[in-house]
Amino acid sequence: MFANDMETIKTIKAMRESVAAARRAGKKIGFVPTMGALHEGHASLVDAARASCGWVAVSIFVNPIQFAPTEDLASYPHPLEKDLELCRARGADVVFVPDVNEMYPPDRPRLTDVSIRELGDALCGRSRPGHFTGVCTVVAKLLNIVGPDKLFLGAKDYQQATILRRMILDLDYPVDAVVCPTVRESDGLAMSSRNAYLSAGERGQAPALHGSLLLAAEMIRKSRPPAEQVVAAMKEFITARAPAGKIDYIQICDSESLRDVPETRGLVLVALAVRFDKARLIDNIVVE
Ligand code: AMP
């Protein structure tokens, strides 16, 4: 269906040249940043980019500065050939796969960070201090390298999408952020590169995370109970069905400020993170 001449580019210079050529040809540039180990969730972003942009770039870069020393940087999966195949099959024009020295030259230690107040300290920011500074810094760099018209992000990482949308506004990046729905396995588990770390037993239990979000949505829609009542019901649900998981947080927040709310009125975000042995999984639902 698509031409098979997808380019794989490793340097910033070559990437800039490739984008410039696409621009000269009058193409609208769509950009999908990823850390690789691609699945249907990522593919849905490529599809969305393909549907509205004449030229689609995907980046695959496992960004070391968004991982704490205790996290899974060293074991993060790198199935590059398979990833390139998926990008080609879904019609990407270019895949940008810089190595770490290209993005962070060892002879030029980085003195600049992009960090975001408040939004970056909530939810996952509490258990992953510095994480969103790493995310904002790399996405700022990637936006400066690619210069896309549209940036495609997944709702699965709701906080990340909220933060990047705000960074784009605060720093006047001339790009539209498009947030695409979470793609799930048939049993409801949100697709994630980290699902591969789950043991068979944990994989059997993990759909309880989504189950607890559906329970929360049902409770909120039915009777708008106080947030703590919803959180308590979700905890009970997860503890009973996913005993291998340790709850990192379950929070009910304002869907824009990400501040905890005591009442479940208006548009609320229900977000959770649960740690299994080798994988920390996140998921969320927005309830109107
Ligand atoms: P990652 O490779 O985990 O950094 O994710 C790259 C992009 O894919 C981010 O915008 C994610 O939100 C998005 N993404 C990851 N998993 C999913 C999913 N299950 N559904 C939709 N988007 C996703």
Image (tube, rainbow, N blue to C red):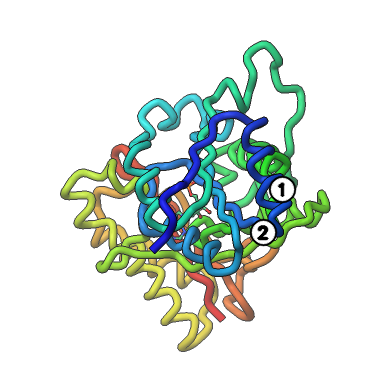
Q: Is residue 136 visible?
A: no
Residue at the far top: name it.
107
- The residue at the point 65 percent across, 56 percent down is 29
**Is ligand 1 less than 8 Å from the beta carbon at label 1?**
no
User: Residue 147 bears which disc, if any?
Assistant: 1
Q: Marks 2 and 1: which is nearer the front?
A: 2
Give the crowd class for mark 1: few <14, some 14-19, many >=20 residues within 10 Å: many
| Amino acid beneath label 2 | Lys
Q: Is residue 256 visible?
A: yes
Image position of 109 (left or right of 43): right
Q: CA distance from mark 2 to mark 1?
A: 12 Å
Mark 2 secondary-structure assignment: loop
According to the picture, the residue beneath numbered tag 2 turns out to be 27
Image position of 243 (left or right of 2): left
User: Residue 133 bears which disc, if any?
Assistant: none
Viewer-nearest residue: 240 or 5: 5
> Residue 279, image x and y in percent?
34, 42
Mark 1 secondary-structure assignment: loop
- The residue at the point 34 percent across, 38 percent down is 81
Give the crowd class for mark 2: few <14, some 14-19, many >=20 residues within 10 Å: some
Q: Is residue 71 above or below residue 215?
A: above
> Residue 188, image x and y in percent?
31, 67
* Count of marks overlaid on the render: 2
Residue at the far left: name it.
200
